[in-house]
Image (cartoon, coloured by chain):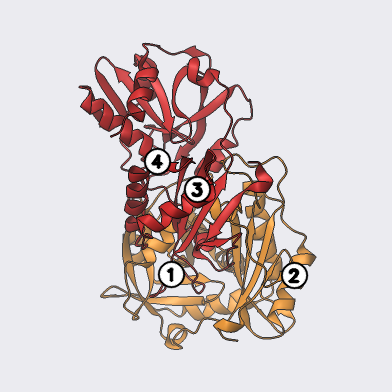
Chain colours: A red, B orange
Amino acid sequence: MNKSSDRVLVNGRPAGRIHPLDRGLLYGDGVFRTLKAGSGRIEWWADQYAKLAGDSHALGLDCPLEEQLRSECLELAKGEDCVIRITLTRGQGPRGYAPPANTSVTRIVHASPLPVYPPQNLSQGVRVRWCTLRLGQQKQLAGIKHLNRLENVLARTEWSDADISEGLLLDREGWVIGGVMSNILLMRGKTLFTPDLSLSGVAGVTRTRIMRAAMRNGLDVRESQLRPQDIYRADECCLCNSLIGVWRIRMIEDMECGDRGWADKLRNWLNEIN
Amino acid sequence: MNKSSDRVLVNGRPAGRIHPLDRGLLYGDGVFRTLKAGSGRIEWWADQYAKLAGDSHALGLDCPLEEQLRSECLELAKGEDCVIRITLTRGQGPRGYAPPANTSVTRIVHASPLPVYPPQNLSQGVRVRWCTLRLGQQKQLAGIKHLNRLENVLARTEWSDADISEGLLLDREGWVIGGVMSNILLMRGKTLFTPDLSLSGVAGVTRTRIMRAAMRNGLDVRESQLRPQDIYRADECCLCNSLIGVWRIRMIEDMECGDRGWADKLRNWLNEIN
């Protein structure tokens, strides 16, 4: 599946296009999910749908029925491993910020090839850097995977070195929030720490699944305000998202990070049914 | 010109549609302008184009040539008074936050009917309220009219009372930033104050024109950090944008505001050639 064979359904219509007055385009008024699908299955579908429904609810969007979305994802995947992006917008409306009284959600399901990452990202871990961009704080949007992602875009332009796999982001107050495209997890003793995302960042499904699995496996799990020094002091730090799974952070800029075998363990837990 | 007669050019193509992988939709990766056009003219075109070019530059987008955009605006206006929205996005790209090496800006020019506001908004002023949403702070995006406008959308959902014409926004630190769809101006003696927008808000063209005109007319003009009490203590407060022009704030919630005739004066200055 290459770029030219990208497949899309817009409100169920193959090769559909978007109206220029769609509020997803006008204002970024919508939410999205990125997930893996393959032969007859969608990875972590129940969690993905629950997150999509929750994010939709937070913005006052009507989330389509689970079965409709699931069948569209499977239709596009056509049995091949691929990335599915589901985007929901508040639909078309007249100009102006006020959401129209009667809106009809625009539903976009798009399949594209799986990204190819160096195999050593899994086997040895990755090198990351600190981004200079500081994330704004907005409690009404924090945690939600909405379409206002310019901060991520700008942060991602800060480096082009292929040896750097991810950038780490602080918020305006210097708290660690996560990676540009991933969440961060820290191990210290038998405790798994992950940033408190009540003011910034996206609370991803992979993070949630790992937290749940870690609790079930007897770890203490804490969402906390974390500083860069907490990252450096950790036994091991990992990044996660639905496409990469779990990567250990091998180096932050020129500083080596700990390796206690947690990345493999978390990765195994992540793939358990839970 | 009614809704069904909305007219649009997408990269010059009439009734064009947007690809679902356009980064304007994926990430809100773009900028826009809203302006008035009429018979053979576009209001404040030089300022509007300069702001669009500046905002594009800030995000690393190639702004189309002035003459191309101008002629598309005039083509759509067809000699009728209307609102033109110009949207520029980073164009299509593969999934992922990193802007592709070779992008081709998507250029959307859309004409819609002029909004109809109560005539007394001009003659008597408007009633406004304080929004509870607090704007995040992001110095790399502040001032720019970009497509990440969920904060404005959420703030605008806080009221539906038609008697309230605008909501006033504070940032997370309690500084006054402006209205949901407008900038705010305060008069005190011979000084015009307007909020410092280096961390939040949109620095609109109408605000810039009024500041320039006020300086030329001998006022002291200051961009400052302002608190709500500065609003209450002002001789007069006004709102401005390209569609409303200048409205005096008559009441903030149930509190009457001053009236020293500045709104009419600023409105006249705004329309001078400058």
**Tag 1: amino acid:** Ser
Q: Nearer the viewer, mark 3 or mark 4?
A: 3
- In the figure, B229 relative to B128: above or below? above
Q: Are marks 4 and 2 on the same chain?
A: no
Residue B70: mark: 2
- In the figure, A240 relative to B57: above or below? above
Q: Based on the displayed image, in which of its 4 quarters is residue B97 positioned?
A: top right
Contact flag, marks 3 and 4 (Cβ < 8 Å): no
**Nearest to the observer: residue A95 or residue A89:** A89
- Mark 2: few, some, or many residues within 10 Å (few <14, many ≥20)? some
Q: CA distance from mark 3 to mark 1?
A: 19 Å
**Tag 2: amino acid:** Arg
**Tag 3: amino acid:** Arg
Q: Find residue A167 and report its horizontal and vertical position in percent.
A: 51, 30
Q: CA distance from mark 3 to mark 4?
A: 19 Å
- Mark 4: few, some, or many residues within 10 Å (few <14, many ≥20)? many
Q: Are marks 1 and 4 on the same chain?
A: yes
Mark sitting earlier along the chain (3/4): 3
Contact flag, marks 2 and 1 (Cβ < 8 Å): no
User: Circle 4 is placed at which residue position?
Assistant: A201
Q: CA distance from mark 4 to mark 2?
A: 39 Å
Q: CA distance from mark 2 to mark 3?
A: 36 Å
- In the figure, B175 relative to B234: above or below? above
Q: CA distance from mark 2 to mark 1?
A: 33 Å
Q: Chain of mark 3?
A: A
Residue B133 visible in this rendered orientation of the protein:
no
Q: Find residue B158 and report its horizontal and vertical position in percent.
A: 32, 67
User: Circle 3 is placed at which residue position?
Assistant: A85
Q: Residue at x 43, y 83 (%)?
A: B121
User: Circle 1 is placed at which residue position?
Assistant: A104
